[in-house]
Image (cartoon, rainbow, N blue to C red):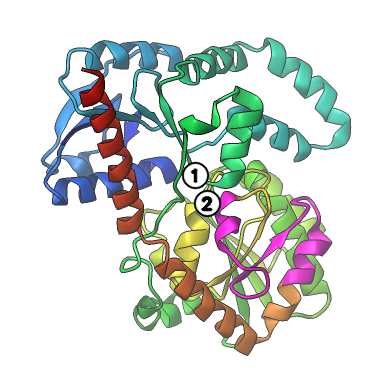
Amino acid sequence: MRIGLVIEHFNPHRGGAEQWTYQFTERLLAAGHEVHIVAGCFAESTDDMPLVRHKVGQVGSRLGFATAAEEVLRKLALDVIHDMGSGWYCDLFESHDGSRFAQWEQKLNAMPAWTRPAKRRLMNVLPRYQQFRELLTRQFADPNRLILALSRMVADDYLHYHEVRPEQIRLIYNGVDIERFSPDHRERYREDFRRNLDVGEDDILLLFVGHDFQRKGLATAIRATGRLVTAGQPVRLVVVGGRHSARHKRLAKRCGAADAVDFIGTITDPVPYYAAADVYVLPTFYDPCSLGVLEAAASGLASVTTRFNGAGEMLTQGEDGYLMDDPADAEELAHYLRPLMDRDLCQQMGDAARRTALDHTLQQNCDQIVEVYQEIASSQRRAA
């Protein structure tokens, strides 16, 4: 098939959507498809990929990119156009951010209650949010466009916030590369990385991976770590990702966890950190289907996340992870972490998490999406 993929940044090191799109592209190429990428920029690390590149020039805004991408796409003879959330001219629309409206509501809940009314008023008038609303209106306007939802939560959000018809939605969870993320890497990385992090043999190492600290619930993770430290538990928290950590470092100090929280910053390869860790924590306020939870599971780690994470739909409470009801409740997170201070239980749940990941591989994910492509192509042939 001649497949067009639309994304602003074709760069596997930039974020979850970009990483997933890169891995997905690799598999499409391996299967013999002709892949056209329409993007604003291409990472140098992708130069050797046998792609057809269509670079959209400097456009200055999200609306500008979407308009420019449409101009490029209209000139191409493609079997299917798959947009990753950046544009509106496509056959299949997949937002790796889920519903922006639902995300905004949840991000308000992550803020102190007294600030929310003012923030809500600003969201109604700031140009950034106005642009997003116009973009979203056009992305969900076409009744013939198929919408790929990464979880049931996201599908429900599309029905509620965007008035999408149920028959437009295709539910496909994210998948994970079970060879890249595997417990087998522990032998290579675990001892050295724990030593470099000054993590003791008996310490339970919690891992947080994310860039948007507020939405991903890092403050909750730090406060819960502080509670465990105060109770004498041998626990450490490693934070991977993000750039602006000063506020959260001050929070760790106030919580009595300054010596128990390490901020690593942005990295290119998270595999060694999964290998070094014992538990993955992501008390997120909104995540369509966290790749981190899947990567942790494939690496043999149990996760503690929330019911506002679509990836939680793949977990079984108390078997391969725990789901919190309130992302802001540090005591609830600490409650679920306390049993995992038992290394035997931690290992048992981690083994179960690996089995869960084996049912949600990246290859299965890709195969399911290609089936949707074939559905679209077949429908177009019938309409011709």
Tell me which amino acid carries mark 1. Answer: Leu
- Compared to 161, does 288 lie above or below? below
Q: Residue 14's image quarter? A: top left
Q: Position of residue 224 (x, y in %)?
A: 76, 63
Q: Secondary structure at mark 1?
A: loop
- Residue 156, magenta (yes or no): no
Q: Is residue 343 visible?
A: yes
For the residue pair 353 and 157, the one nearer the viewer reads as 157
Q: Residue at x 39, y 65 (%)?
A: 271
Q: Report the residue marked by disc 2.
A: 290
Q: Is residue 234 visible?
A: no
Q: Residue 94's image quarter? A: top left
Q: Position of residue 343 (x, y in %)?
A: 62, 86
Label 2 vs label 1, nearer the camera? 1
Q: Report the residue marked by disc 1.
A: 150
Magenta highlight range: 310-336
- Distance, label 2 to label 1, CA atoms, is 9 Å
